[in-house]
Amino acid sequence: MSTTNQIAVLVSLMVNAVLFGFGVIAVLSIPAVSAEAVWLVPAVIVLSFATTPFIARWIAPRLRLRGRHGLRAQA
């Protein structure tokens, strides 16, 4: 397994938690939507699991960059 894939697996845990948290807070904090929470919370779970690999795979290579934003690596 490549280093980028290993980083993506580790990042996916955090990405999934953030996506799920945002989704559940949005569902439960809006009164008009919270009435349908029985159906929307499982939808949030499925959507967070479905989008996590794509976002984690997008973030992982950026974590390996050095000198990003004009910063130089310490020698």
Image (cartoon, rainbow, N blue to C red):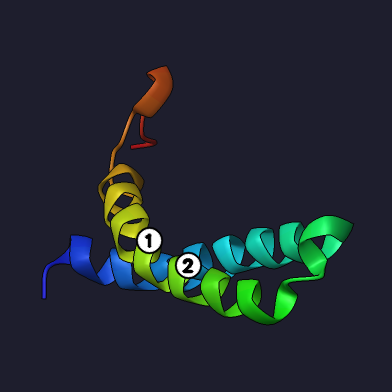
Q: Position of residue 75 (x, y in %)?
A: 33, 37
The CA span between labels 1 and 2 is 5 Å
Q: Amino acid at mark 1?
A: Thr
Picture quadrant of residue 54? bottom left
**Residue pictured at 27% horizontal, 56% vertical:** 57
| Quarter of the figure that contains the N terminus | bottom left
Q: Amino acid at mark 2?
A: Ser
- Which label was assigned to residue 48? 2
- Which label was assigned to residue 51? 1
Q: Eyeballing the image, is 62 above or below 17? A: above
**Residue pictured at 36% horizontal, 53% vertical:** 55
Identify the secondary structure beneath mark 2: helix
Q: Nearer the viewer, residue 12 or 29?
A: 29
Picture quadrant of residue 68? top left
**Residue pictured at 83% horizontal, 57% vertical:** 32
Q: Position of residue 49 (x, y in %)?
A: 41, 73
Q: Is residue 71 visible?
A: no
